[in-house]
Image (cartoon, rainbow, N blue to C red):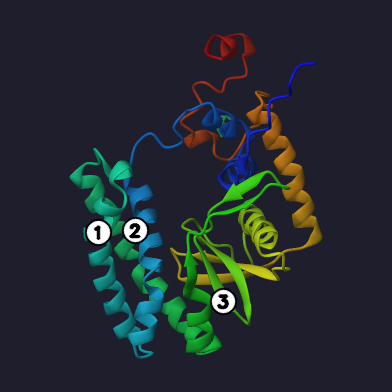
């Protein structure tokens, strides 16, 4: 009898790729680079993610004043930009000086809004709850579940209202209320993984929109759990070689796979 090959373990990042576009997940799984080169926008996002990791330190020492907060964020941004090549040598290898400068300028332009939102949240929720929601008790912990055939690394775990919960950093736009659907899936996947690791129910997760200094709480519903399981099964099929249908996605215009992702299947077969 032929021995069935094991289904490769799924990474949470693959679920997110799938949610954005199943075909993209297919291409990345086949070794294509999602972002072939660094540009100003990617760098801005990288800088703002790193900057957000310094919020707890800043909030701890800073008096609740918009000017102070802005100055501390500016100083932290400068340090972040100096450290960046040491933190991301592979991503920054070959990045042009202009790109680095553009990334820094773009990130700096976000500071007034970040400072205003952090200050607003401090006034609304208080310093201690804010620090609890932002301060990691574990940074980038590896989580996995054999039962889900899933693994992943959330940005951090924080201890909030007596529970250890995952928190993810998002550098894109922030919705007016709540979180984007794909961010809900991202957060829910880590909730499931943390529950599998800890054996306890995880009541919610945080999504931090780092370009805005906004933190959103996501309570994971049964429908989210169901969705994760469904996506895992679809991703497994793609990892086994199935190419999903091409749909016109909002990412198509900027997608670097577009030249391969053409409707003409006879041409596609030349590549795959
Ligand atoms: S071109 Fe569009 S459909 Fe094809 S992989 Fe890119 S985003 Fe997906």
* Label 3, ligand 1: CB separation under 8 Å: no
Q: Earlier in the sequence, mark 1 or mark 3?
A: 1
Residue 148, relative to residue 183: is it above or below? above
Q: Read off the residue under disc 3.
A: 159
* Of labels 1 and 3, the one closer to you: 3
Distance between mark 1 and mark 3 Cα atoms: 28 Å
Label 1 element class: helix
Q: Residue furthest front?
A: 1
Pick the residue in front: 235 or 108.
235
Label placed on residue 36 = none
Residue 227 located left or right of residue 270: right
Distance between mark 3 and mark 2 Cα atoms: 25 Å
Give the image quarter of residue 249: top right
Report the residue at 69% width, 47% height from top.
146
Pick the residue in front: 106 or 80.
80
Q: Read off the residue under disc 2.
A: 47
Residue 81, relative to residue 17: is it above or below? below
Residue 208 located left or right of residue 18: left
Report the residue at 55% width, 87% height from top.
125
Mark 1, other Cα within 10 Å: few <14 / some 14–19 / many ≥20: few
Query: Residue 143: horizontal and vertical position, in percent?
Result: 58, 55
Mark 2, other Cα within 10 Å: few <14 / some 14–19 / many ≥20: many
Query: Residue 150: horizontal and vertical position, in percent?
Result: 65, 46
* Of labels 1 and 2, the one closer to you: 1
Query: Residue 171: horizontal and vertical position, in percent?
Result: 46, 57
Q: Quadrant of ligand 1?
A: top right
Report the residue at 35% width, 79% height from top.
58
* Of labels 3 and 2, the one closer to you: 3
Give the image quarter of residue 17: top right
Quadrant including the C terminus: top right
Quadrant including the N terminus: top right
Q: Read off the residue under disc 1.
A: 83
């Amino acid at each position: 009898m032929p021995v069935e090959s094991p289904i490769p373990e799924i990474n949470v990042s693959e679920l997110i790729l799938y949610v954005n576009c199943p075909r993209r997940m297919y291409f990345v799984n086949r070794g294509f680079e999602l972002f072939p080169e660094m540009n100003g926008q990617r760098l801005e996002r990288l800088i703002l993610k790193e900057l957000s990791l310094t919020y707890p330190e800043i909030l701890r020492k800073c008096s609740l004043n918009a000017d102070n907060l802005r100055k501390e964020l500016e100083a932290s941004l400068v340090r972040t930009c100096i450290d960046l090549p040491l933190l991301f040598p592979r991503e920054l290898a070959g990045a042009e000086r202009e790109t680095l400068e553009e990334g820094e300028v773009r990130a700096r332009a976000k500071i007034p809004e970040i400072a205003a939102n952090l200050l607003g949240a401090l006034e609304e929720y208080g310093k201690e709850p804010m620090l609890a929601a932002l301060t990691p008790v574990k940074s980038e912990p590896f989580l996995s579940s054999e039962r889900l055939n899933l693994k992943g690394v959330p940005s951090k775990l924080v201890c909030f209202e007596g529970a250890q919960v995952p928190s993810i950093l998002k550098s894109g736009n922030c919705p007016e209320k709540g979180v984007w659907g794909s961010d809900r899936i991202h957060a829910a996947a880590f909730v499931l993984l943390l529950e599998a690791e800890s054996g306890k129910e995880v009541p919610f997760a945080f999504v931090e929109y780092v370009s805005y200094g906004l933190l959103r709480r996501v309570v994971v519903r049964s429908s989210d759990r169901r969705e994760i399981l469904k996506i895992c099964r679809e991703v497994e099929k793609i990892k086994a070689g199935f190419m999903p249908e091409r749909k016109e996605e909002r990412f198509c215009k900027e997608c670097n796979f577009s030249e391969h992702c053409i409707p003409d299947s006879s041409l596609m077969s030349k590549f795959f």
